Amino acid sequence: MKCLGIDIGGTFTDFIYIDSEKGTVTLHKVSTTTLNQSIGTNQGIELFKEKSIPLHDLDVLVHGTTVATNAILECKGVKSSLITTEGFEDLIEIGRQNRSNLYSFYPTRVTPLVQRKYRFGIPERLDANGEIILPLDPSVVDVLIEKIRDFQIESVAISFLFSFFNPKHEMDVAQTIGKALPDIHISLSSWVLPVFREYDRTSVTVLDAYIAPLMKNYFNSFLEVIRNHQVRNPPLILLSSGGVTQIKNATQKSVETVLSGLAGGVLGGYYSSQLLQIDNVLTLDIGGTSTDVASIVNGSIEITSENEISGYPIPIPTIAVQTIGAGGGSIAKLNHGILQVGPNSAGADPGPACYEKGGIDPTVTDANLVRGLINPDYFCDGRIKINLTKSEEVITTLSNDLKLKSVEEAAEGVIEIFENNVALALRKVSTEKGLDSRNFTLCCFGGGGPLHACALAQRLSIKQVIIPPHPGVWSAFGLLTADIKHDLTKSIIKPLNYSVLPYLETSFNELVHKGIKLCIDDGFDEKEIIIIKEVDIRLVGQSYELTVSYQDEIEEMSKSFDSVHEKAYGYSSPNAPHEVINIRVSAVVKLPKFSLPKLPLGEDIPPPESLMEERSIYLNGKWEKAAIYKKDLLRSGNKILGPSIIEQADSTVLVDKDWFVEVLEDGHLIMKKF
């Protein structure tokens, strides 16, 4: 089986090619081309051609992208309009009653993605059952078309009251606009998210409209690159939920790709946890621009419908992952006399000062280079040249500004603040959720994860760390572990009793039919499709619901809900009336899986040829002698004591004092504290 994973991050674009028949793994990292990410993709694929690795006969190609993520974070989506029920034009500005900082004297509000002058309300109305009580006037739509044309709107979001029960008015307006303005993109709330809660549904529909034209253009350019390299099988796109689908399906609902680039890392961490049979794992992905963290509890990835990006809700199923602006490119600077690291990043261009591409600010990478932790001659397998002198210059300037005694002290201060920021993010997915981090294993990857693994584990009192075989491209690897998955949701809002069962069955059949069709469109047979049914239930009068598996016995569903409710809130009310809010269907097709090559069996002591040199590194306020090993020359069963460093093409592993590492047969490293 031949697989290729392509993951685009803020600084690097990662590639991993696995040929399980030959037992080979080939990986590359290139700088992300932020203006057009497909250029970087083409550059990476060209490197495979240079090694005479043909890609035309790939069995699987999976791609994770940050195009949608960046467009939202940087407010660079397309000029969009919102059409809604008259009187609800300001819904996306009013938002919810949630306050991120309740006691702030200077609270800030999220800026709506659609300006007020581009939000239009039209007279139409459905009641709470979806019955039409005020018909749509076609002449009003004609007037709107002229406004849309005059304002040069590129994309339109349509969200009417109670359209999740009856989409007729939304579809009528979309059809009329589509005929008059065939080049404009239209997002319907009844397709994007047909559930109740007006703000969430309207906001996510606006998000979809805001990024959809960008995603369509990007996917077209990506497909062109793939076709130019004669790849026959259609590429798959990773969705925020951790499933994959063909590009044509991802284009129809672009908002499902908003967290595409983040989900791959969690899938990679999940693969490691399952392979090593470790149920409770915190995943840590430190890249060049950001750090992503997530928790795997009792062997399961947490899926949530309450995620957000830049304050905008994403009420669709997504992997629960926290992201902060902390990475190798995070800029260190004085802010009112206090050293601050991140969230601003030097990114891929100009990058850290050591890249010699015009960067003048000290970064985390520069600090680690000054501490001797990074080999300037073996960065990205030696293909990217970095300059230690440049790092020393910018860190020296920072040291002088801080009035410190040495450049090393300044470098260690930068790392101390950086690691504290990352530790806070890890606590958000562990201790702040009532999980005891001492019972977890830390799985570290990304270019920077293995370098900071021991220090971060110690901050959270974690005594065991996993380093995957190819940590620098492990997010790209995670893409290849995903399955085809389509998530569909529909609001019901009915009492949970036996009279609702026939209605639930009919509604489920409708969603199942849609899910099967989407999988068939992906090129699979109906016999391969696995259907998963779930329901959202709440106590009558509650504001939010909990998700449980669907069963055709009301008592069993009620018991499941009561059990989940007790775990979530510490109590249950089995005698109180329950109600079904939403039904959910996941249509899944399991894709063929591959195996990683095994390492030759070795002794406890690493082979002599794996020891490259002895180098001084700066740890805990002083210079220490550390043994430097080359990962490619290590063998299964080798054990290494800290302080030492293991270098490989895509990352660097620091084994701190009082830690030791063992090499497993599949290339994983297990680090433990004495």
Image (cartoon, rainbow, N blue to C red):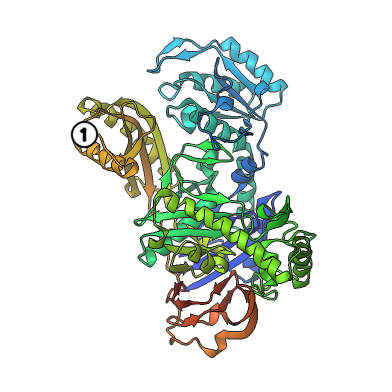
Question: What residue is at 49 percent from the left and 81 percent from the top?
Answer: 640
Q: Quadrant of the N terminus?
A: bottom left
Residue 368 in percent (x, y) is at 66, 68
Closer-to-camera residue (348/392): 392
Count of number-bearing discs: 1
Residue 182 in percent (x, y) is at 63, 27
Above or below residue 644? Residue 299 is above
Quadrant assignment, res 557: top left
Q: Please state if 545 lies on the left or on the right of 503 as rendered.
A: right
Residue 546 in percent (x, y) is at 35, 38
| Residue that extends furthest to the bottom in the rendered view of this protein | 608
Q: Please state if 335 lies on the left or on the right of 266 as rendered.
A: right
Secondary-structure class at tag 1: helix
Closer-to-camera residue (613/130): 613
Q: Is residue 214 visible?
A: yes
Residue identified by numbered label 1: 554
Residue 663 in percent (x, y) is at 45, 77
Q: Quadrant of the C terminus?
A: bottom left
Amino acid carrying label 1: it is Ile
Closer-to-camera residue (51/641): 641
Closer-to-camera residue (494/503): 494
Q: Is residue 234 visible?
A: no
Binning the other alpha carbons within 10 Å of mark 1 as few (below 14), some (14 to 19) or many (20 upward) gives some
Above or below residue 671? Residue 31 is above
Question: What residue is at 30 percent from the left and 40 percent from the top?
Answer: 565
Quadrant assignment, res 358: bottom right
